[in-house]
Amino acid sequence: MTRSQSGGLLPLNPKIDRTCRQLRRQQRARLATKERIDGHLSSDSEEEHGMDGDYNQHQGNPQQVPPVNQVLGNNPIPQDHGVHHPPKPGPTLEYSYTPRIADIRPVILYSPIPANNFEIKPCWIQVITSSIQFHGLKDEEARVHLSRFLQLTNGFKLNGVPDDAIRLHLFPHSLAGNAKRWLETQPPLSITSWDDLADKFVHRYYPASKTTEIQREITHFRQEPDESLRDA
């Protein structure tokens, strides 16, 4: 046997078997320690990987985020909890006093006419507006105007239509100026018949005070000796 160039012979060990067993036990112990260390490192790595995976699943991939109803169940999401909103502003004063179409109604409530051919002829209106017009002036007589209106409209006839219905439709066309405005400012649907309209017209422009004044003048009438009846 030749000697190696890099080292000498190992010393003789009389208890070689015991030494081998000790070396094997030490080697097994080192292997076991290494396995335990590797096992701990592998477990920690898996936990970190799992956390990172969940984070990436919810953050890096938004489409993988579970729906809200899966997270909250059937409980609704509270809306504006604890937040007080100012009340909505109501209608302005100008809007409150602005007349609306639904509130505009006619003054006269016309009764239904059974005749199917009922129609106020335009020529009738033209005759009234051109011949008799009452403005409500002091020198105008309401009773005289009413008498002239009746005389004029007696010739207006329609088959199946009452005369009072024709007069009720035509009389507003005989008014102008202040008298027209008086009629238009009456409460809606407050006039329901021809007699009602005629009574209110006479009461407005021929009040009881005027009748009393005429009666007083008649009572205190005096004619001087040198005065004619007309001058008195």
Image: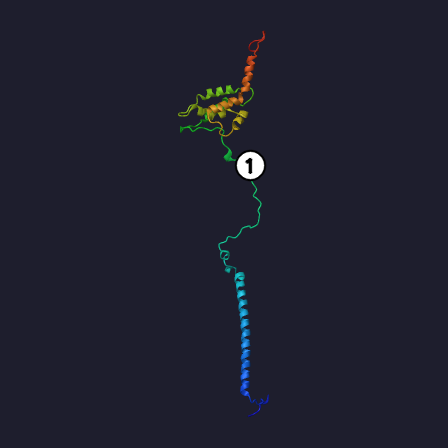
Residue 18 can be seen, yes or no? yes
Residue 126 showing in the rendered view = no
Taking the spot 54% from the left edge, 74% from the top edge, the residue there is: 36
Q: Which amino acid is tagged 1?
A: Ser
Residue 28 in the image: above or below residue 191? below
**17 versus 89 height, above or below:** below
Camera-side residue of 161 and 81: 81
Residue 22's spot in the image, x, y percent?
A: 55, 83
Residue that mark 1 sits on: 96
For residue 84, side relative to residue 109 (left or right) = right
In which quadrant of the rendered image does the N terminus lie?
bottom right
Report x, y in % for residue 219: 55, 13
Depth check: 11 or 124 in front?
11
- Using the rendered view, name the quadrant where residue 13 is placed: bottom right
In which quadrant will I find the C terminus?
A: top right
- Looking at the image, which residue is at 47% across and 20% down? 150
Q: Tell me, what colour scheme is on the image? A: rainbow
